Image (cartoon, rainbow, N blue to C red):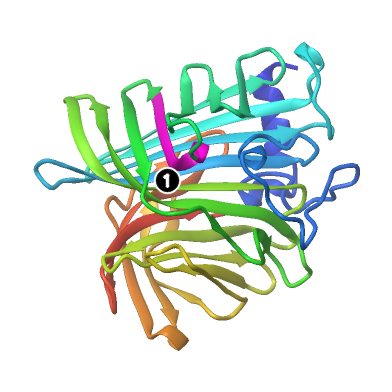
């Protein structure tokens, strides 16, 4: 079985095709599962967790050129395990998939890579931190003694685009849920989940018309689990938002027989408040025909307790990641009770 067939079988097996990433709602027998109360440890947890079935390093950046034009960039490395251990060479049961996206107001670019673990083509390590697949990489450039995620450099290329970005964190790591234990359903499925949401960014986008120097902000998500979704959940709508007053909001809803929501409200100093199921509401405000389907690209996000009433609009409504596992992902602008910018990911449509 070649790598592409293997990854397709792993990520697209029914009923997971509708979920966006297969296996997230299926049985986790033999794999480790998150436990409430386990303290995350760094730098160890910056690296891989092969005893868990699914894991990702996921960075999004909202960017601007010198002329004020908006752009967005995404870099993601997924690890998925066929068995709950690692090994050398071709005996490794770890499978890796990379996604890269670049968004302009007029175009959206995407690319993917696949690899087996154990042979050096892809992987991740905690200390010194680096994650890679082929020539795509996310590498720590932090000074000695600092958290590895306090400064990163990422790069990726596709057939007609590329980027090279450097970022510096201006705040601490943020743990979601209960100390990093993030519940995803009423039945209790969960993941370990933390972020570095305080990056400032500078770098270069390589577009068909030539290079563009950009600056902006970025958000890194780290998450791993073995069964983070319930079996009836078919997809999610996930937002990361940086407001002009320095507050940040991570919020998502998981769609199923019943909608489940969660989020984190983050102060400019990095203090996190977990938002339980039902605190946030997500309401579509308009759709766009994208890749032959109707996608809700305009949203309203409400948190009545905080007086938060946000409206989001995409920089490019056609931000479709046309890959083996396809989904919508792109930068957004935020208006309403607060102003800001962010990123939106929608799967399962």
Residue that badge 1 annotates: 291
Q: Residue at x 42, y 56 (%)?
A: 344
Q: Residue at x 54, y 27 (%)?
A: 130
The magenta region covers 147-156
- Does residue 347 appear in this view? no
Q: Residue at x 40, y 30 (%)?
A: 153
Left or right of residue 146, residue 324 in this image: right
Quadrant where the image shows the N terminus: top right
Residue 249 versus residue 152: which sits nearer the camera? 152
Residue 147 versus residue 137: which sits nearer the camera? 147
Q: Residue at x 37, y 65 (%)?
A: 268
Left or right of residue 191, residue 299 in this image: left
> Helix or strand or loop: what does disc 1 sit on?
loop
Measured along the vertical axis of the image, is residue 172 above or below residue 1?
Answer: below
Q: Does the magenta stretch include residue 7?
A: no
Measured as percent of width and height from the top left, residue 27 is found at: 85, 50
Residue 119 versus residue 209: which sits nearer the camera? 119
Identify the residue at the far left of this view. Answer: 67
- Does residue 202 appear in this view? yes
Measured as percent of width and height from the top left, residue 324 is found at: 56, 33
Q: Is residue 155 magenta?
A: yes
Identify the residue at the far right of this view. Answer: 30
């Amino acid at each position: 079985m070649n790598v592409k067939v293997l990854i397709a079988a792993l990520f697209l097996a029914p009923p997971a095709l509708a979920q966006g990433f297969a296996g997230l709602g299926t049985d986790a027998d033999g794999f480790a599962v998150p436990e409430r109360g386990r303290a995350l440890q760094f730098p160890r947890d910056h690296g891989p967790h092969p005893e868990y079935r699914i894991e990702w390093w996921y960075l999004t950046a909202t960017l601007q050129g010198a002329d004020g034009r908006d752009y967005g960039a995404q870099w993601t490395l997924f690890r998925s395990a066929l068995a709950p251990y690692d090994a050398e060479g071709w005996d490794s049961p770890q499978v890796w998939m990379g996604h890269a996206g670049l968004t302009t107001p007029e175009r959206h670019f995407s690319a993917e890579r696949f690899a087996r673990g154990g042979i050096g083509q892809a992987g991740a390590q905690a200390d010194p931190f680096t994650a890679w697949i082929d020539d795509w990489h996310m590498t720590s450039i932090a000074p000695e003694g600092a958290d590895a995620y306090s400064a990163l450099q990422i790069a990726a290329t596709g057939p007609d685009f590329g980027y090279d970005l450097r970022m510096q964190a201006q705040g601490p790591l943020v743990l979601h849920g209960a100390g990093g234990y993030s519940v995803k359903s009423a039945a209790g499925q969960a993941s370990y989940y933390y972020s570095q949401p305080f990056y400032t960014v500078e770098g270069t986008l390589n577009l068909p018309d030539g290079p563009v120097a950009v600056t902006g902000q970025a958000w890194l998500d780290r998450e791993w689990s073995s069964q983070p979704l319930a079996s009836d959940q078919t997809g999610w709508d996930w937002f990361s938002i940086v407001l002009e007053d320095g507050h940040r909001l991570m919020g998502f809803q998981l769609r199923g027989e019943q909608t489940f929501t969660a989020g984190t409200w983050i102060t400019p100093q990095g203090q996190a408040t977990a938002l339980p199921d039902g605190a946030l509401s997500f309401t579509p405000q308009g759709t766009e025909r994208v890749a032959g389907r109707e996608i809700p690209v305009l949203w309203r996000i409400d948190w009545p307790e905080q007086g938060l009433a946000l409206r989001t609009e995409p920089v490019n409504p056609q931000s479709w990641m046309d890959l083996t596992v396809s989904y919508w992902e792109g930068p957004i602008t935020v208006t309403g009770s607060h102003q800001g910018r962010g990123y939106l990911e929608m799967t399962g449509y």
